[in-house]
Image (spheres, rainbow, N blue to C red):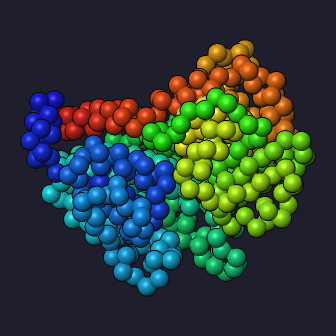
């Protein structure tokens, strides 16, 4: 079993395809894809659409990228999500019959690719498709202003949900990107999975233990990230400064209501962002994240995290009280608060300030190292070896 795998790898005869839902920006899912391509430098990439800007394509290097027919449909560049009902069918247009190993990087449809008997399939699940599960109402309200359009979309999404359930057994060996997503996989598909947190590159994240007197949040400015709650909380704490980094449809509204103690910087280049992360007193976040890469980046800079204590945060931030009132934890890297409310945020900030000397910047950095890309690659390859080995045993 192991011998055949190692022989294939050593002789580079193992044909590998990586299916990635779509390529439009380099975000968390693309950080995973980048490491998958390091693991399999000869892999071919298949994606529904590829509109990734040239400035962000470096990690693809010389990999062959194949797109589906959706790439060529009218308006796809700006509105490819309008073709959501066609995406599962578009996957079937990919000719994957000649590949020994197929890896899906999936937050929508990629895991549902259909393979021939005997092919090995491993799926890295960023999340079950949000459009059709727990965040359907949010997407309908935020994305569609016309009531008739929402009605039609609701019918389409109901069909997509039924088909997602019907295909629940697809995906081969499932990997969840957090314990939170593992639970969602069990709820949505009734399928087992193993947890492997995403890689967080840290080479450019300089450590800093000398802090300035401000808090920071790095986030897209969209409703579900909870940024408006942070603004409300800090408006009620005018003696404390909050720096917001990020852009999005809420930016104008946030600027209009933010007090003088809240600085909205918009998008920052990477070096400038790192500088703020290193100097911040703490990173604050009120959203529900599948994992939360920005919070790991903050810890890599030696900056503690104050965050809503549900979702992926439970994998990435070690709470001061162990998460259950069990007393001080010397390895703590932050605080969890229990409710998504301005009052809860305010209480957590005040509690943090009383505990700050007991939350070590070194502990934050050491915790972040658990998510180093080299560790991700090693653990991912072990999962793939086990899956491939069980196929040929």
- Residue under the point 46% across and 58% down: 26
* Depth order, front residue of 340/32: 32
Look at the picture and state if 162 lies above or below 2. Answer: below
Residue farthest toward the bottom in the current orientation of the protein: 74
* Depth order, front residue of 134/205: 205
Q: Position of residue 254 (x, y in %)?
A: 78, 61
Q: Quadrant of residue 268?
A: bottom right
Q: Is residue 217 visible?
A: yes
- Residue under the point 10% across and 47% down: 13
Q: Quadrant of residue 141?
A: bottom right
* Depth order, front residue of 351/289: 351
Give left or right: position of 329 versus 175: right
Look at the picture and state if 157 lies above or below 220. Answer: below
Q: Position of residue 323 (x, y in %)?
A: 68, 24
Give left or right: position of 1 versus 49: left
Give left or right: position of 97 versus 224: left
Q: Is residue 313 visible?
A: no
Q: Position of residue 304 (x, y in %)?
A: 66, 32
- Residue under the point 67% across and 53% down: 245
Q: Position of residue 352 (x, y in %)?
A: 77, 28
Look at the picture and state if 281 lies above or below 20. Answer: above
- Residue under the point 26% across and 51% down: 102
Which quarter of the image is occupied by the N terminus?
Answer: top left
Q: Quadrant of residue 203?
A: top left
Give left or right: position of 19 versus 357: left
Which quarter of the image is occupied by the C terminus?
Answer: top left
């Amino acid at each position: 079993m192991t011998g055949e795998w190692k022989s294939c790898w050593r002789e580079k005869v193992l044909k590998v395809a990586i299916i990635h839902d779509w390529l439009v920006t380099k975000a968390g899912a693309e950080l995973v894809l980048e490491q998958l391509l390091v693991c399999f430098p000869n892999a071919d990439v298949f994606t529904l659409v590829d509109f990734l800007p040239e400035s962000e394509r470096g990690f693809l290097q010389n990999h062959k990228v194949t797109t589906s027919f959706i790439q060529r449909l009218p308006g796809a560049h700006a509105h490819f999500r309008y073709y959501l009902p066609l995406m599962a069918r578009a996957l079937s247009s990919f000719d994957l019959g000649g590949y020994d190993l197929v890896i899906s990087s999936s937050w929508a449809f990629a895991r549902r690719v259909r393979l021939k008997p005997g092919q090995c399939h491993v799926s890295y699940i960023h999340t079950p498709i949000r459009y059709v599960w727990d965040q359907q109402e949010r997407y309908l309200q935020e994305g569609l202003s016309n009531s008739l359009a929402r009605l039609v979309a609701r019918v389409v999404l109901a069909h997509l949900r039924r088909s997602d359930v019907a295909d629940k057994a697809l995906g081969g060996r499932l990997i969840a990107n957090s314990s939170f997503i593992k639970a969602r996989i069990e709820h949505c598909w009734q399928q087992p999975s193993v947890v492997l947190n995403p890689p967080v590159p840290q080479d450019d994240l300089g450590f800093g233990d000398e802090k300035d007197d401000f808090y920071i949040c790095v986030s897209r400015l969209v409703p579900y990230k909870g940024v408006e709650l942070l603004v409300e909380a800090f408006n009620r704490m005018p003696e404390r400064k909050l720096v917001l980094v990020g852009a999005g449809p809420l930016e104008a509204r946030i600027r209009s209501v933010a007090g003088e103690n809240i600085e909205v910087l918009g998008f920052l280049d990477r070096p400038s962002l790192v500088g703020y992360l290193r100097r911040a007193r703490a990173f604050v976040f009120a959203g529900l994240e599948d994992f939360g890469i920005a919070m790991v980046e903050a810890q890599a800079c030696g900056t503690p995290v104050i965050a809503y204590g549900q979702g992926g945060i439970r994998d990435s931030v070690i709470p001061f009280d162990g998460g259950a009132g069990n007393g001080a934890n010397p390895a703590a890297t932050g605080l969890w608060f229990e409710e998504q409310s301005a009052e809860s945020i305010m209480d957590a900030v005040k509690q943090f300030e009383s505990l700050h000397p007991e939350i070590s910047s070194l502990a934050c950095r050491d915790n972040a190292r658990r998510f180093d890309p080299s560790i991700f690659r090693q653990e991912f390859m072990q999962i793939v070896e086990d899956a491939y080995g069980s196929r040929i045993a």
